[in-house]
Image (cartoon, grey):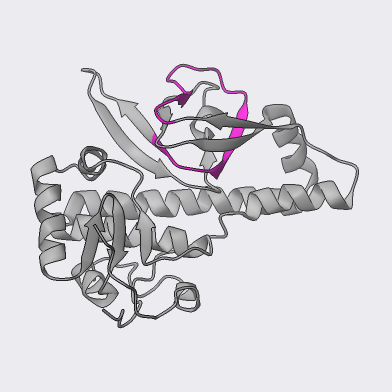
Amino acid sequence: MTISSWNYNYTSNDYSSLKACLEGMEKSDNFTPARSHRIYHTRQPLISVGDAFGGLYILRSGSAKTITMSADGEEYITNFLYPGDLIGVDGFDQHIHIHNVFFLETSSVCFIKESDLNELVRNRDDFRHCLLKEISHMLTRNSSMLMCLSSYSSEQKVAHFILERASHFASLGLCGTQFRLSMSRTDIANYLGMALETVSRVFANFQLRQLVTVINRQLSILDITALSDIVSRDPSFNSLSTSLNSKISMTDHPSFAN
């Protein structure tokens, strides 16, 4: 089926801007911040509640989830993280982390210690700009998600979730219409504040209406216009960046085989 158009105008972000900024500085001058690259596997923790803050992580590959614990011990997924995302910003406040971070698949991160961060912020306008831009993007994304959780119907929540993933992958220069969902349906339901059965029912309905196909977590968007119309009550829908129009190829996509 042909994708008719791309109308979902979610804020675009250069997800590699911080990493590219650091690499550019290393090539252009003598300042080389100490960065350690680490590999983690599925379900391994990166940060736990109460850990001391020592610096920031940049996710280089893979994906992760951020979990907050309620007073009665319930776990709530507050974010899904992808390449280029900052991890550990919560630790700036009181120098301890208030979230748990677990990896959804084999992933790699880059760690920049706090002393280097402070020096970069003080002395490098380019790095400071990239850091503030990334934090601003995180706040915008969280604000959009809060509105989704507080006022959207079940269909709108799932459509918003799918289109947010599509926006992210397109911003990475990857295909925004075919991608793998690294999280489980249970995780998606937790994140969206919905029952697992409701999430499964909405996905089944979207497939019946030929809006998407999902096979073994591989999702293909078949009708972006229809998905966009479902979430069109979002006030950011028409006012935010339209740069993704040039990043997604409007071509026919073959159906996935079982």
**Residue 172 forms part of the magenta stretch:** no
On the image, the x and y values in percent for residue 195 come to: 11, 41
User: In this picture, is 140 found above or below 41?
Assistant: below
**For residue 190, side relative to residue 55 (left or right):** left
For the C terminus, the quadrant is: bottom left
Pick the front one: 65 or 53? 65
**For residue 176, side relative to residue 229 (left or right):** right
Kindly identify the residue that appears in the image at 20 percent across and 17 percent down: 72
**Residue 60 forms part of the magenta stretch:** yes
On the image, the x and y values in percent for residue 106 come to: 48, 36
Kindly identify the residue that appears in the image at 21 percent across and 74 percent down: 226
Kindly identify the residue that appears in the image at 44 percent across and 58 percent down: 168
On the image, the x and y values in percent for residue 76 come to: 27, 32
Q: Quadrant of residue 120?
A: top right
**For residue 135, side relative to residue 121 (left or right):** left
Q: Which span of residues is magenta-colored?
A: 42-65
Kindly identify the residue that appears in the image at 10 percent across and 61 percent down: 205
Whether residue 89 is visible to the viewer of this picture, yes or no, is yes
Most extreme residue toward the front is 258
**For residue 258, side relative to residue 128 (left or right):** left
Q: Quadrant of residue 56?
A: top right
Whether residue 153 is visible to the viewer of this picture, yes or no, is no
